[in-house]
């Protein structure tokens, strides 16, 4: 099996200093002018441009010349405009650890966590990814931010691997919710609601179908996108009438397949039903397997 580990590219605690360019810079230059060099030091990784945007570029401080001038270790590869962000960080690499699932719960800090990889931060993306070719639900994963041998952050919250592919991409869920440009909304938050949606779909449809779906038919992808987006909107804005209705509509669509009011087909048009006995999901007032804000 294989499992893709999702790593949040930037978190606030690894940001050392923020400033901005004071003048335009051309591609190929190795000296930049900024509003202030306060807090910057030789060797600091720098990101010039808005983090998580395609225009961002990684650099490194070679020398702090004066209060507004920085020499870079290498020439810039692209041009940047005055007022573009300049961000110094404590770490520019993510280190991934893995531990076996022995007790069906997250391993403790003193468990046998093994480093399995390092990935340079993907600066123009909200998340950086690592594919563990031998991974899956038999393992837990966590990661730290590092800079060579001089800095390593505290580890992230452990996340259990899974043995099946997700039903929908984070981008599809973001677009459905209208959050495609919400750079301050981390992928980890979107993924939490994706997992909640997948778990609810699997639990609801397990009486009539073999779950998890592998591969997932198109309708399951659509249901996941709609349910996860609705959960995300309710989490962000509360249970307003519009978002609550989106949540009810998504669950009603799932119920129609659970109760065999609609027939779930694979992408070749073949029915995926496994039996005639189907249990009903509780009404809206009953407890659910997952609630908004749950951590797992």
Image (cartoon, rainbow, N blue to C red):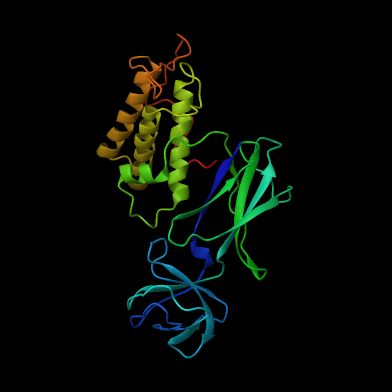
The quarter of the displayed image where residue 266 is located? top left
- Which image quarter is the N terminus in? top right
Query: Residue at the spot x=36%, y=47% of the render?
Result: 236
On the rendered structure, is 134 left or right of 164? right
Q: Is residue 293 visible?
A: no
Asked if residue 189 is positioned above or below residue 51 in the image, the reply reads: above
Asked if residue 167 is positioned above or below residue 279 in the image, the reply reads: below
Most foreground residue, 66 or 4: 4
Residue 76 percent coordinates (x, y): 44, 76
Residue 179 percent coordinates (x, y): 33, 49
- Which image quarter is the C terminus in? top right
Asked if residue 180 is positioned above or below residue 51 in the image, the reply reads: above
On the rendered structure, is 234 left or right of 58? left
Query: Residue at the spot x=25%, y=38% of the render?
Result: 242
Residue 150 percent coordinates (x, y): 66, 71
On the rendered structure, is 19 left or right of 107? left
Q: Residue furthest bottom?
A: 66
Q: Residue furthest top?
A: 276
Residue 171 percent coordinates (x, y): 38, 46
Most foreground residue, 155 or 60: 60
């Amino acid at each position: 099996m294989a499992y893709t580990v999702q790593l949040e590219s930037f978190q606030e605690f690894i940001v050392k200093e923020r400033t901005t360019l004071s003048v335009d810079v051309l591609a190929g230059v190795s000296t930049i002018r900024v509003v202030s060099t306060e807090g910057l030091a030789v060797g600091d990784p720098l990101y010039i441009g808005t983090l998580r945007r395609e225009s961002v570029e990684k650099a490194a401080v070679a020398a702090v010349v004066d209060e507004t001038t920085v020499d870079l270790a290498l020439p810039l590869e692209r041009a940047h405009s005055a007022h573009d962000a300049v961000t110094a960080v404590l770490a520019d690499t993510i280190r991934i650890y893995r531990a076996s699932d022995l007790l069906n719960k997250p391993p403790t800090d003193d468990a046998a966590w093994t480093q399995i990889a390092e990935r340079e931060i993907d600066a123009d993306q909200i998340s950086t990814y690592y594919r563990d070719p031998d991974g899956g639900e038999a393992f837990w994963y966590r990661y730290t931010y590092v800079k060579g041998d001089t800095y390593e952050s505290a580890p992230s919250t452990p996340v259990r691997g899974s043995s099946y592919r997700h039903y929908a991409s984070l981008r599809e869920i973001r677009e459905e919710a209208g959050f495609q440009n919400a750079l301050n909304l981390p992928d980890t938050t979107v993924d939490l609601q994706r997992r909640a949606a997948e778990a609810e779909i699997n639990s609801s449809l397990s009486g009539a179908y073999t779950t998890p779906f592998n591969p997932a038919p198109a309708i399951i992808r659509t249901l996941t996108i709609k349910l996860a987006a609705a959960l995300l909107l309710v989490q962000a804005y509360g249970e307003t009438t519009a978002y609550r209705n989106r949540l009810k509509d998504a669950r009603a669509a799932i119920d129609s397949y659970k109760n065999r009011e609609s027939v779930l087909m694979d992408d070749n048009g073949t029915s995926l039903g496994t039996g005639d006995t189907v249990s009903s999901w509780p009404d809206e007032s009953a407890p659910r397997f997952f609630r908004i804000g749950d951590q797992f």
